[in-house]
Image (cartoon, rainbow, N blue to C red):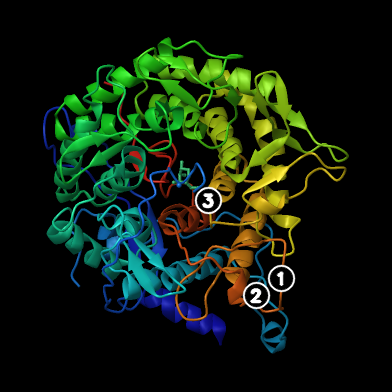
């Protein structure tokens, strides 16, 4: 019976066609983007319910999140456009774990192993469950507070909405896409303006989200909105050094200092390049790229410590100002963007040099092993003192190393093995907890590999481990990565899903008060936009074919927004 229902569903499903870009905006723009076609099955859902807006200001937090307290139809040439075309790629790569439903199976009440396609469908359903919390309680606002069922603003930019658009496209949710697209066209930047938006967060989530929405839909409205936003944010770069201020007052059109960072954090100034470079290419205005390329040059000129960067720098002297060397908060995506700038633009050999030099130091000076089981992890350094801790944020590292290994094998093929080893460690962060969910940070000062300190027991629904599992799957096709991803997904479903709508962050992953996981006292009233923008997207793509957002065609920004790689001229 279930098989028949599945066939019926498939029968009424439509197929997704990854886009064709045929409309040059400008000689210096999309004319060189090639046509990529990849069909995939989709199941379209009912439109999500209408929302109520609770206009309420969130207290503004200018710390980047990675620090701590951080009906109509689409255009014909959009990703969805192949709805009437026959599917080209219905065969799912075998994992050796698929099962065939039999009548015998159907009588059995024990949990059945799902096919790859059914797993994808379940992830899509859970995305919609979470998305419905946003549309119902916070539509058009930045973030939803899923427990108190309200929305909050600090950016006034529909942060969650824009962070989710490309996931919605990738999952084939047409009605949801249309509703978001209409909101962006009519309401983005039209209401109240923020007095302190983080340049970094706005760039990776909003600018990146708009660019990606364009790349997957070919709808130029998204570029116009990205230009409008960048023109306001540009004020941040008007400093004596050209190193941007971390915040922008959009009301007054002024850059602002942070109340807690002296100078600038390396992640914040080094994780702007992909988006602003691509905006120049798409808009034909070279000024955006010029600003971030100047910053990249300054970074390249800085003296490093042990071949790496520390967390903070002084814009005037162009020197590092602290002694903490880590691949975690405040610096993580700086290294990621060295590699990704080169993948975006293969002419950017300076970015490749920076990646080559820094990743070599990271591997030789930070990679170490735990006791007694020899789990590989990246330690931190404080001057010459070793600090044996690793943040979940640093779990993007195996994915980045695997990406370098498969895209630039001549130089980095040897990074795949250490990437696999650290991947296992990051999975252990989840697997060893009673909830099956990772804490924010682990301490390797332990006689059982690692332990969790009381202050680090929370889980914010972060993406880094499933992001890396996605890359490791694409790099190796070892089914273990899909299994690990599925286990993590099921743990989120069991412990972070709310009964009505939404998912929530957890206060303590080391504790289960009751069997069904619906203990409200262990919940945080938060569902960060990256849960929909990144975590659910990478989980879904983990069970997709390789040609759906092919890594040969796209590079993901640090917020999981795919940007089309430039063709070499
Ligand atoms: C996201 O905003 C991005 O992935 C960023 O690079 C790091 N922090 C969050 C998710 O944890």
| Marks 3 and 1 in Cβ contact (< 8 Å) | no
Among the two numbered marks 2 and 1 on one chain, the one whose residue lies closer to the N terminus: 1
Q: Is residue 457 left or right of residue 150?
A: right
Neighbour tally class for label 3: few under 14, some 14-19, many 20 plus, Cα within 10 Å: many
CB atoms of marks 2 and 1 within 8 Å: yes
Q: Which mark is residue 517?
A: 2
Which residue is tagged 1?
512
Between circles 3 and 2, the one closer to the viewer is 2
Q: Which residue is mark 3?
A: 463
Question: Please, is residue 534 above or below residue 514 in the view?
Answer: above
The one nearer the camera, 459 or 249, is 249
Mark 1, residues whose alpha carbon is within 10 Å: few (<14), some, or many (≥20)? Answer: some
Give the position of the N terminus as an image quadrant. bottom right
Relative placement, left or right, of 302 versus 236 is right
- Ligand 1 within 8 Å, label 3 CB: yes
Q: Is residue 324 left or right of residue 232?
A: right
């Amino acid at each position: 019976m279930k098989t028949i229902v599945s066939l019926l569903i498939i029968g009424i499903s439509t197929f997704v066609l990854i886009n064709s870009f045929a409309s040059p905006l400008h000689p210096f723009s999309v004319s060189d983007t090639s046509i990529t076609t990849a069909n995939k099955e989709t199941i379209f859902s009912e439109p999500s319910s209408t929302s109520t807006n609770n206009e309420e200001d969130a207290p503004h937090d200018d710390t980047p999140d990675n620090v701590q307290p951080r009906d109509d139809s689409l255009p014909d040439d959009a990703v969805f456009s192949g709805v009437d075309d026959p599917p080209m790629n219905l065969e799912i790569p075998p994992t050796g774990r698929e099962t065939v439903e039999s009548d015998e199976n159907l009588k059995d009440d024990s949990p059945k192993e799902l096919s790859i396609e059914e797993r994808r469908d379940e992830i899509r359903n859970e995305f919609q469950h979470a998305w419905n919390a946003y549309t119902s309680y916070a539509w058009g606002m930045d973030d939803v507070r899923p427990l108190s069922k309200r929305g909050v603003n600090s950016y006034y930019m529909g942060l969650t909405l824009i962070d989710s658009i490309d996931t919605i496209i990738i999952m084939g949710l047409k009605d949801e896409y249309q509703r978001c697209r209409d909101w962006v066209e009519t309401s983005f930047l039209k209401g109240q303006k923020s007095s302190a938006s983080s340049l970094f967060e706005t760039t990776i989530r909003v600018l990146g989200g708009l660019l990606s929405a364009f790349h997957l839909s070919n709808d130029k409205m998204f570029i116009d909105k990205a230009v409008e936003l960048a023109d306001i944010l540009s004020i941040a770069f008007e400093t004596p050094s050209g190193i941007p201020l971390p915040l922008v007052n959009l009301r007054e059109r002024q850059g602002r200092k942070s109340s807690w960072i002296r100078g600038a954090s390396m992640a914040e100034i080094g994780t702007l390049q992909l988006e602003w470079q691509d905006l120049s290419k798409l808009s034909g205005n070279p000024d955006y790229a010029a600003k971030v390329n100047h910053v990249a040059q300054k970074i390249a000129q800085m003296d490093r410590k042990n071949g790496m960067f520390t967390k903070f720098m002084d814009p005037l002297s162009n020197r590092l100002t602290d002694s903490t060397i880590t691949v975690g908060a405040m610096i993580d995506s700086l290294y990621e963007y060295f590699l990704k700038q080169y993948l975006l633009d293969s002419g950017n050999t300076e970015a490749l040099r920076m990646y080559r030099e820094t990743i070599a130091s990271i591997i030789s000076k930070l990679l170490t092993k735990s006791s007694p089981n020899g789990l590989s992890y990246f330690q931190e350094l404080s001057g010459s003192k070793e600090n044996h801790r690793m943040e979940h944020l640093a779990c993007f590292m195996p994915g980045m190393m695997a990406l370098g290994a498969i895209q630039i094998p001549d130089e980095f093929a040897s990074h795949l093995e250490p990437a696999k080893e650290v991947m296992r460690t990051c999975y252990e962060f989840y697997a060893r907890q009673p909830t099956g969910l990772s804490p924010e940070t682990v301490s390797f000062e332990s006689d059982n590999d690692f332990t969790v300190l009381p202050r680090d027991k929370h889980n914010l629904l972060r993406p880094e481990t499933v992001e890396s599992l996605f890359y490791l799957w694409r790099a190796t096709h070892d089914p273990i990565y899909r299994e690990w991803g599925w286990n993590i997904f099921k743990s989120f479903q069991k412990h972070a899903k709310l009964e009505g709508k939404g998912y929530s962050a957890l206060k303590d992953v080391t504790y289960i008060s009751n069997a069904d996981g619906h203990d409200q006292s262990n919940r945080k009233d938060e569902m960060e936009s990256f849960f929909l923008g990144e975590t659910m997207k990478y989980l879904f793509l983990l069970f997709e074919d390789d040609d759906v957002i092919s890594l040969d065609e796209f590079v993901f920004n640090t917020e999981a927004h795919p940007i089309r790689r430039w063709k070499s001229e």
